[in-house]
Amino acid sequence: MSTELGLWQERYTPPAGPVVLVIMDGIGLAPPNDGNAVSQADIPTLRRLWRENASLQLAAHGTAVGLPTDKDMGNSEVGHTILGAGRVLPQGASLVQKAIADGTLFGGATWQQVVDKCTGSEAGTLHLIGLLSDGNVHSHIDHLFALLRQADAAGIARVRVHPLLDGRDVEPHSALRYLDRLETLLAELSSGADRDYRIASGGGRMRTTMDRYWERPDVVEAGWNAHVHGVGLQVPSARAAVERAYANKVASDQQIPPFVVADAAGTPVGAIEDGDAVLLFNFRGDRAIELSAAFEHEHFDFFERGRRPDVLFVGMLQYDGDLGLPRHCLLVPPAIGNTMVELLSDAGVPSYHVAESSKFGHVTYYLFGMRSRPFARAKVHEVSSGGLEPDEHPEMKAAEVADDVIAAVDSGEYRFIVVNFANGDMVGHTGSLPAAVKAVEAVDAAITRIHDAVRSSAGVLVVTADHGNAEEMLQWSAKSAAFKQDADGNPIAKTSHTLNLVPFVIVDERQPPGYAVRRDLARPGLANIASTVLNLLGYAAPAQYDPSLIRPAPEQTDAG
Ligand SMILES: O=C(O)[C@@H](CO)OP(=O)(O)O
Ligand SMILES: [Mn+2]
Ligand SMILES: [Mn+2]
């Protein structure tokens, strides 16, 4: 049930043109230094907009965006969801952590179904697939360990783990650290009578299983073949697969080729069979949806699945509330209603949403409150990323995306336009500092043109970011107060997001604009943006939203 949108204040006149919200993915704020691609970039427009307009620094990580602690870096899922919802909501990482602590994760009917499937006279194998790290962006190794211990306690005899190696939310070459911990636990649990817990297949997350928004279904296909059919590069152990990739100079664990653990006779140790249970232990949805669909959907056009095993498929969370995907999950996250776009749509206010493929769902699915179906008045448009490697093409599709935004502005059809530029983040994740500098410059060039169009249409431009990344491209050692170095004395790349604040600037040519930026909020963050956008459009924000970052201009306070 949606609430009506009331007027913000009588004397405020909304702009003639649209409010255009630009989200620079992964471009945070940090002091200038040798590892900061943003401070090194030639970005005249961003510097000028920042200097000449009302700006703020917003919290985009930790508890400010519903993550368990302030040690948790921000990410696109929580950033865009909170930005769209206008209030802080507990995110997947927090929901799972709490459900493990209070026992509810294993107290429901779905876990019982898993146990029933994998115990008794016709016991199937329990397969656990997911990202193996403590990044807490898509998954957490502690959650996997809790599942393994619970499986043992419930009497499940045979478990196969299919770890996806990270290197994107954690250090680029850290897979062995997590694999060794996993192997130790598996050995401990397997030492009990009648227990056989092993690693069966896996691979680097960008080459295996964790595609998103159907950009590279071949990545899911490679994972499917390894996990389900046991087809792929055969290795005696996961460690051997990693060592082999390192010998081949793989830049980061994300890119480790898919592998299948096989016995001496060449038989895969854990293909997925009819009667098994498969649990995807990632809590985040975007990169979990494709594998879920491959297991569940009767009709599936993205790749040839071959034999589709008849299994009980379970997600850690429900990944898409609209599609009800997957059908079974350990936790159903609370539905997120009254997002800013839903309220605008219900009030008949048209909005436009554009990004290139790699971030398309960020300005749609996440901004809508984890729903894949657009609201009636929300028009969505995806610019194809074209399968380019971000470090080789740091400009990505920024120019094309900008063209599209400008066309939407010029059309006069939309009151609210939101765009995500993927560059800072996607290139930031590759660990290439020179490419990240170019990526940030491409975003600046795009914003330069968008700014012109917004000005010509008498609209308002708002520029912000969902979390940091490109502003920290090298690993810093607090202990030695220097950048970390590898054995050859080279600085070690940082591929992950950061804990930094993000920029927020309102570019409004109207004099006076009819409001002032608030400086009195204790910890302004992404949750304050939706109220601000609604106010800029002339609408009051619902009471459940966090406060706006603007207030009526002083002479108008009596009307506010
Ligand atoms: O690529 C991803 O899946 C995450 C990092 O794990 O990045 P973002 O949150 O920016 O989408
Ligand atoms: Mn992001
Ligand atoms: Mn990212």
Image (spheres, grey):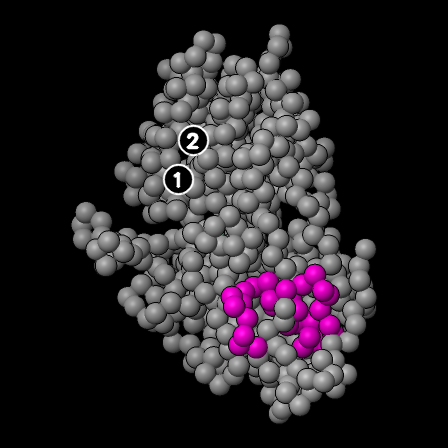
Q: Main secondary structure of the magenta part?
A: loop
Q: State the residue lying farthest toward the bottom.
A: 511
Q: Position of residue 373 (x, y in %)?
A: 73, 53
Q: Depth check: give the residue in front, 384 or 460.
A: 460
Residue 398 x/y as whole percent: 52, 67
Image mark for residue 259: 2
Disc 1, SS: loop
What kind of residue is marked 2?
Phe
How far apart are labels 1 and 2 at the CA level? 9 Å
Compared to residue 26, the image places residue 454 above or below, namely below
Residue at x-position 67% and y-position 77%:
536
| Magenta span of residues | 518-546
Q: Is residue 81 magenta?
A: no
On the picture, is 454 further left or further right than 539?
left
Q: Position of residue 523 (x, y in %)?
A: 51, 66
Picture quadrant of residue 191 = top left
- Seen from the viewer's position, the closer of residues 234 and 271 is 271
Query: Disc number at residue 256?
Result: 1
Q: Quadrant of residue 378?
A: bottom right
Circle 1 Cα neighbour tier, 10 Å, few/some/many (<14 / 14–19 / ≥20): many
Q: Secondary structure at mark 2?
A: strand
Q: What residue is drawn where x is 69% and y is 75%?
A: 535
Query: Going 48% across and 67% down the picture, which residue do you hit?
Result: 502
**Residue at 42% across, 76% down:** 43
**Mark 1 vs 2: CB contact within 8 A:** yes
Query: In the image, what residue type sits under mark 1?
Result: Ile
